Image (tube, helix red, strand yellow):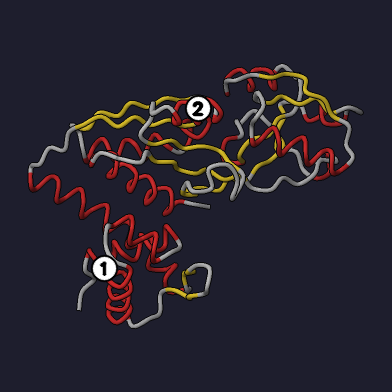
Amino acid sequence: MSLEIDLLRSFVTIADTGSFTAAAERLMRTQSTMSLQLKRLEAVVGQSLFERNPRKVVLTDDGRRLLPHARKMLDLHDAALADVRGQNMQGLVRLGTPEDFATIHLPQVLARFAEDFPDVTLEVTCDLTLHLIDQFRIGAFDLVLIKREPQGLFAAGKGVWREELVWAAANPAVAARAVLPLVVSPAPCVYRKRATEALSRAGRAHRIAYTSPSLAGSQAAVRAGLGVTVLPREMVPADFSILSEAADLPVLSAAEIALLEASQLSRPGVLLRDHIIRSLGAASP
């Protein structure tokens, strides 16, 4: 018995959406078909892959072990099929993304997609989440990655990444000031909100010392000693220090990156959407 691609695609889509109904809608199949395909896959592997409850389905330990392999197999299958068929998938996909996320996580993801589909034109725009959402609303993007509170604004978007947030500074002594100076992005910003709300709950006096819409501007201000900032742990520059709880700073909860998609995606848009979900899902912390 072998792992059929259609069965793996159904399995991955159920895992991504957390729902048989949502997975069926995405793949344009019936819910009964999705259930049948999952049963067939579970029969092949000899293990239960999901635990069902009234609200959503959750991966079992065996399902979590299979998921990254299934994603890789789907990536290879789709790329091989496109290449062998010589279909030369063409079109334009407009992707919006926060600058910091694009700096670290997206380059390799997009490079692999461009290699698999060289005739698809990617138009990537980096901006603040607020601006990305505004532009998405008027149809300027096909796909948008945004920072959001879990189950917050645009809760219908697919959560694809969670980021561990930390306090960082070029000069740790800045954190010892009676009124903590902050270097942040303009409001509304998830990181800014996390920082100010956590400090307020902890009773720590603070002020906004420097606001910059760009990552480079914020990091320059931190390097100049103008304040501390909040960054995903993976994005802290080598010349910055991660400030521990010893600096009298509260622990920050993780943030979420979600993917929004236009109501009518082109075939290249669907391919990029699925590629992003699989790639980030496989590497998600």
From the viewer's perspective, tell me whether residue 200 is left or right of residue 271.
Answer: right
Q: CB atoms at circles 1 and 2 under 8 Å apart? A: no
Pick whichever, 147 or 74, lies toward us. 147
Q: What kind of element bears circle 2?
A: helix
Q: Amino acid at mark 1?
A: Leu
Q: According to the image, label 2 marks what residue?
A: 134
Reply above or below: 273 against 49.
Answer: above
Residue 234 rendering spot, x and y as whole percentages: 57, 40
Residue at point 37%, 27% (across, down): 124
Closer to the N terminus: mark 1 or mark 2? 1
Residue at point 34%, 66% (across, down): 11
Pick whichever, 234 or 192, lies toward us. 192
Q: Which mark is residue 7?
A: 1
Among the 4 quarters of the image, the one containing residue 15: bottom left
Mark 2 burial class by Cα count in 10 Å: few <14, some 14-19, many 20+: few
From the viewer's perspective, tell me whether residue 216 is left or right of residue 26.
Answer: right
Pick whichever, 203 or 170, lies toward us. 203
Q: Residue furthest right?
A: 178
Q: Count numbered badges in the picture.
A: 2
Q: Quadrant of the N terminus?
A: bottom left
Q: Nearer the viewer, mark 1 or mark 2?
A: 2
Reply above or below: 274 against 57.
Answer: above
Q: Amino acid at mark 2?
A: Asp
Residue 45 rendering spot, x and y as whole percentages: 31, 78
Reply above or below: 63 against 226.
Answer: below
Reply above or below: 54 against 157.
Answer: below
Residue 66 rendering spot, x and y as whole percentages: 37, 68
Q: What kind of element bears circle 1?
A: helix
Distance between the alpha carbons at the discs numbered 1 and 2? 38 Å
Residue 236 rendering spot, x and y as whole percentages: 61, 34
Among the 4 quarters of the image, the one containing residue 178: top right
Residue at point 77%, 20% (across, down): 209
